[in-house]
Image (spheres, rainbow, N blue to C red):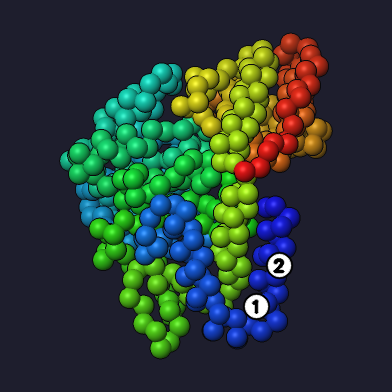
Amino acid sequence: VPLALRDIQAGIRAECEDQPADFLSRKLENRWLEARFQLSTWLGTKEENIAFCENATAAMNELAAWFPLTPGDEILLNDHEYGAVHRIWQRKCAQTGAQLRVSKLPLQMEHSQQIVDAILRGCTDKTRCVVVSHITSPTAIRLPVEEICTALKQQGIPVCIDGPHALLQEPLKLNRLGCDFYTASCHKWLSAPIGSGMLYVHSDWHSQVEPSRLSWGRLPPTIPKQWSDELLWSGTRDYSAYLTVPEAIRFFQLFSTEQVDARNHELACYALRKLCEIPGTEPVTPKDRRWFGWMTAVRLPDLPEVFYTSLQQRILHGYGVEVPIIKFRDRYLVRVSCHLHTTTHDVDLLVRGLRKELATAGSPQDQPAQRGDFGIAFAGK
């Protein structure tokens, strides 16, 4: 979270703590609605289609809690989906007698139609919703969500897009996307405070929404009238993360969107190139902008699992770099995220650390990483 945003959140929190009754009962509602309006405008949809949630996982739980399923119905995911999303829908299916199906996406990806076809093959006349990531969590793949939505709309199948990594990283306009539901976290690439996320529900579904937790929704004497009203007031709590989201949007409007995108993607390309120079590694996707943006994942050498179980901590404590080491399809991956606070120096430290660690497992001897010159500075708007 940028220091300027931390200060803004601290000011909001202090305002509430200094006089909580006044803040929560008289100021919060209008400020929540204004923050929601600014987020929905930035995302290209009407404000009544959006509600704040703590994160994408909380939003997915809200959706699953009321989504209509009966015995024999099916929910379709794919094998690149986030593990918590699998758990959420597995429980919903167990509660309702529905079935969770999982499509397997192709190992070698060459064109987007492969992804669309793999998902369509998993659909049946019992499929009630397809859940698909905008950018996959374990593998950092940009899935062709627009094409997926178009294909499934022709089949009459609702689509929920799980998009915690997409806000800011993708030029997202929800009304054009054509999905029924969208979940996201604002604390990732948008860099808003932890505890800020959102749920989008298309207007066709508003009448069916039944939020999982009830409080006042709108403070009396105002009566909740829309589905999102029920998620406004959820009790006495810290709402400062939500109210800071508009400031995060304004923060990134100080920069050129094109330059931020080009800078972060170029750094991701640098990371991909340097990681693939390590013997035994290979990219998860083609080295093409269509498949990855500001994140990239690389398969690590096929070594005993015991070597990888603590590798993430060894890289952190030995080289000062925090990076996910993820098991996917019986192979371990390293997934790199490149934002404005990341430089080639960080990538070089990671590569140097991986080389040294792999050398201890019998891999080729360590080779010094070449220092790049790609810094953080670039012109503003």
Q: In this view, does 252 lie to the left or right of 351?
A: left
Mark 1 → mark 2, Cα distance in angstroms:
10 Å
Q: Under tag 2, what secondary structure?
A: helix
Image quarter where the C terminus lies is: top right
Residue 348 x/y as whole percent: 75, 25
Q: Earlier in the sequence, mark 1 or mark 2?
A: 2
Q: How crowded is mark 1: few (under 14 residues within 10 Å), some or many (20 or more)?
A: many
Q: Against 229, is 139 above or below?
A: above
Residue 77 x/y as whole percent: 36, 40
Which residue type carries mark 1? Answer: Cys
In terms of image quadrants, where is residue 322? top right
The residue drawn where x is 40% and y is 63% is 47
Q: Is residue 110 left or right of residue 4?
A: left
Which residue type carries mark 2? Answer: Ala
* Residue occupied by mark 1: 16
Farthest residue to the front: give it. 381
Q: How crowded is mark 2: few (under 14 residues within 10 Å), some or many (20 or more)?
A: some
* Residue occupied by mark 2: 10
Q: Answer whether labels 1 and 2 touch (C-beta < 8 Å).
A: no
The residue drawn where x is 40% and y is 52% is 44
Q: Against 64, is 103 above or below?
A: above
Q: Is residue 90 left or right of residue 124?
A: right
Residue 62 x/y as whole percent: 41, 60
Q: Under tag 1, what secondary structure?
A: helix
Return the residue nearer the eye: 77 or 304: 77
The residue drawn where x is 71% and y is 57% is 4
In terms of image quadrants, where is residue 10? bottom right
Q: Is residue 332 visible?
A: no
The residue drawn where x is 38% and y is 21% is 111
Return the residue nearer the eye: 179 or 38: 38
Residue 246 x/y as whole percent: 56, 60
